[in-house]
Image: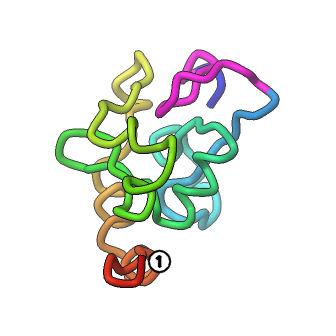
Amino acid sequence: MLKAYKGSCAMTGCELEPVLEAAHIHPYQGDKTDVISNGLLLRADIHTLFDLGLIWIEPTNLSIRISERLRKCSEYASLDQTPLTLPESVSDHPSQAALEFRLNSKQMRQLEPKTENL
């Protein structure tokens, strides 16, 4: 993952290797999901927010989206609607199917905070 993303967070561009982590897009289910196209190299805090469903990737245009909760009150607001940094190799680009699965999964919908509760 470090090599594919040239040691840089796909969302923030952070190059500080000790804080970079490989994040699965579709939950890990053995070797078939343990591929570069099912992952993103993310800074640790971004990885946590991604897993919580507070930051996600729009599958159609590969832009970063953030929840209303983050948009209102955090330094993460500047990431909203910015393009994801992609690996050079097209075969390593995030899988659109995995991104769609994540966006549409029941887990994602349950984790997205409701705006009326903010």
Q: Residues within 10 Å of mark 1 (few under 14, many from 20)?
A: few
Say if the magenta span includes residue 89: no
Number of disc labels: 1
Question: Which quadrant holds residue 68?
Answer: bottom left
Relative side of 60 to 70, left or right: left
Residue at left 35%, top 55%?
Answer: 99
Quadrant showing the C terminus? bottom left
Residue at left 48%, top 43%?
Answer: 76
Say if the magenta span includes residue 16: yes
15 lies above or below 71: above
Residue at label 1? 111
Magenta span: helix, strand or loop, mainly?
loop
Q: Which residues are magenta?
A: 4-17
Q: Foreground: 66 or 117?
A: 117
Q: Residue 38 in the image: state x and y as whole percent.
A: 48, 48
Secondary structure beneath label 1:
helix
Residue at left 43%, top 83%?
Answer: 110
Q: Foreground: 106 or 33?
A: 106
Q: Residue 53 in the image: state x and y as whole percent.
A: 47, 65
Q: Residue 64 in the image: state x and y as whole percent.
A: 34, 43
Q: Foreground: 26 or 16?
A: 16
Q: Given the image, on which type of amino acid does mark 1 rest?
A: Leu
24 lies above or below 22: below
